[in-house]
Amino acid sequence: MPNILLLNGSSRENGNTEQLTNILLQDVAHTHVNLRDFLIQPIEDKRHTPGGFTEVADDYEKLIQLVREHDILVFATPIYWYGMSGQMKLFVDRWSQSLRDPRFSFKEEMKTKKAFVVLCGGDDPYVKGLPLLQQFQYIFQFFGTEWLGYVIGKGNAPGEALNDQQAVQQANYWNKVFRSF
């Protein structure tokens, strides 16, 4: 049975994105991480400097260790201004640091993982969320991570995503797939 890590990028507790992921992962063993509960600092880009990145006193190391320990990564984020949440973006941006980390081979490790995406937004998310899906696809492609699939939901005010029958149906479908792993 694979280890599943849910990386929830929502700033709202029990928001629409989280409600869809609850359906997706109901009765599925997983580790649930709310990025809002962790301090992730931006860093100066030192990918091309001889010394590499400067150490930062935040929670990134804890989070990247969880990523490294899990087989399937579920990225769940509201669609904020047609992109991923700021907290999710800070986390993914820090992967440049992990690519330079001499303690492990992050890119090689990411090749062994599978990824899934859950998006939720209120402004025509089935169309306007597509560039964000493509962004995730490019990230996974860069690492060689297998992309399993996605669910997009429509919801702005709390609880609205549960009224999106298409999203709920897709989340239920993928729940069966995740339970079969």
Image: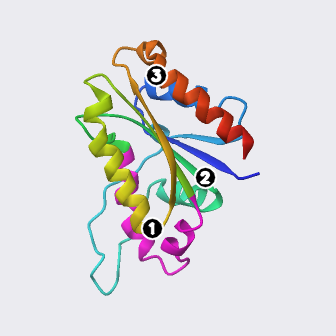
User: Start and end of the magenta stretch?
Assistant: 88-113
Label 1: which secondary element: helix
Q: Is residue 45 visible?
A: yes
Residue highlighted by disc 2: 72
Q: From the image, tell me which residue sits under label 1.
A: 143
Residue 122 falls in image quadrant: top left
Q: Earlier in the sequence, mark 2 or mark 3?
A: 2
| Residue 116 marker | none
Mark 3: amino acid: Gln
Earlier sequence position, callout 2 versus callout 1: 2
Of marks 1 and 3, which one's residue comes earlier in the chain? 1
Using the numbered discs, state the Cα–Cα distance from disc 2 to disc 1 in whole angstroms: 14 Å
Q: Residue furthest right?
A: 1
Q: Position of residue 162 (x, y in %)?
A: 48, 15
Which is more foreground, mark 1 or mark 3? 3
Q: Which sits in the foreground, 135 or 10? A: 135
Residue 94 rendering spot, x and y as whole percentages: 38, 61
Q: Disc 1 to disc 3, how far (Cα)?
A: 30 Å
Q: CA distance from mark 2 to mark 3?
A: 24 Å
- Badge 2 density bin: few <14, some 14–19, many ≥20, Cα 10 Å: many
The label number, if any, that marks residue 166 in the structure image: 3
* Quarter of the image where one finds residue 33: top right
